[in-house]
Amino acid sequence: MAPMGIRLSPLGVAVFCLLGLGVLYHLYSGFLAGRFSLFGLGGEPGGGAAGPAASADGGTVDLREMLAVSVLAAVRGGEEVRRVRESNVLHEKSKGKTREGADDKMTSGDVLSNRKMFYLLKTAFPSVQINTEEHVDAADQEVILWDRKIPEDILKEIATPQEVPAESVTVWIDPLDATQEYTEDLRKYVTTMVCVAVNGKPVLGVIHKPFSEYTAWAMVDGGSNVKARTSYNEKTPRIVVSRSHSGMVKQVALQTFGNQTTIIPAGGAGYKVLALLDVPDKSQEKADLYIHVTYIKKWDICAGNAILKALGGHMTTLSGEEISYTGSDGIEGGLLASIRMNHQALVRKLPDLEKTGHK
C-alpha cells in the first residue's frame, strides 16, 4: 500500500521508470558529445585534434577564422618567447650552419613557441598544410582549443566570411624570428609570425612583437589593423638590411642612390617589414626600402609579404619575380620590399644586387 492510500499499478511504475531513463539518457549523451568535442576525438593522429566542422571535412575554410586563429597563435607563441627570455634559461644550441657560415641557433623559446602555435592552428584547421621552421615532435602533441570567436577588430574590417578550399591553403609559421638577436637579448628585433597562402599567393599575414605586445595583421582584399606611412623617400631612401651583411648592400646602395643613402642594419625579417609601415612602437626604426641579398626561408617573409600586398606594397625577388609560397621552403634570388614606390623602377636600379643574390 502506497502512502496516503494511493495505489501504484505495475503499469504506472513501468511508465514512470521509462520516462526517468529517457531523461537520464538525453542528459548523458549530451555530456558525452561535449567531452568528445572537447578532446577532439576523430582528429588526425599526427597533427592535433579535429577542429570546426566547416574545416574538418576537408572542404572549405573561412579566412576570417584563419586570421583570428593566426593572431591568437602569434600571441600565444610570443608569450612563450617572452617567458623563456625573461627566465634567462635559453638552452641555446646550434642546428648547423647557415649558407653564410653563421650558427643557425635554436632555443627553448623557439621550441615552446612552435609547439603552441602549430598545435593551436592544427587543432582548429586539421585539414590544411602547415609548414613551420622548427621540428614538430609527435610526443609533444597538444590539443590547444580555440573558442571560435572572431575578435571585433577583425569583424569590423572583414564583415563577411571569406571561404576558400582547404586544399588550396598553406600556412607558414615562424615561431621566433631573429633567434640570433634573441640570444643577444636584442629584444626589439624579435617577432612571431603566421602567414596563410592560397594557391601559393600570400593572403593573410600576422607579425607579433612579444616584448612590446604589438601585433600587425592584414588580409589581401580584406582589411588590416596597420597602414602605410604618409610618405617615403625614393631618391635617397633609408634601406633596412640584415645585420649579417649590411656592408654588402651598402656598397651597391651608395652607388645606386648616392652618398645620402642611409643603411639600417637590423635583425629579423618581420622587424624589417614593420620598418616600412606606420607602427606605433617607439623601438621600431623607420625605413623606406627593405633589401635582402642572400638565400632566405619562406616562413621568414611570407607574413610580411601578405601585409605589404594587402596595403598595396610589393615584395619580390631582386629581379622582380613574385614569390610562390608552395614547394621549397626558401628562395635564392634575394628580395626587395617597398610600398608606395615604383617597385619595378627600383628593381631596374639594382642589377648588381640581383647578381649578388644568386651567389
Image (tube, helix red, strand yellow):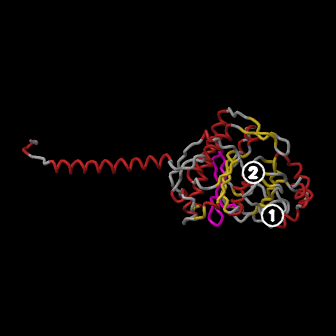
**Residue range of the region highlighted in magenta in the rendering:** 201-225
Q: Position of residue 157 (x, y in %)?
A: 58, 63
Residue 89 lies, with reference to residue 313, above or below; the image says above
Task: Identify the residue at horizontal 68%, vertical 54% (top origin).
Answer: 279
Q: Main secondary structure of the magenta part?
A: strand
Asked whether disc 2 touches disc 1, contact meaning CB atoms under 8 Å apart, the reply is no
| Total numbered badges shown on the rendered structure | 2
Q: Residue type at mark 2: give it.
A: Ala
Marks 2 and 1 sit apart, C-alpha to C-alpha, by: 19 Å
Q: Secondary structure at mark 1?
A: loop
The N terminus appears in which quarter of the rendering?
top left
Which residue is the site of mark 2? 269
Q: Mark 1 — residue?
A: 321
Is residue 94 among what the camera can see? Answer: yes
Where's residue 131, x and y in %? 68, 51
What residue do we see at 28% from left, 48% from top? 21
How packed mark 1 is, by other alpha carbons closer than 10 Å (few <14, some 14-19, many 20 or more), is some
Q: Is residue 31 left or right of residue 91?
A: left
- Residue 297: mark: none
Q: Nearer the viewer, mark 2 or mark 1?
A: 1
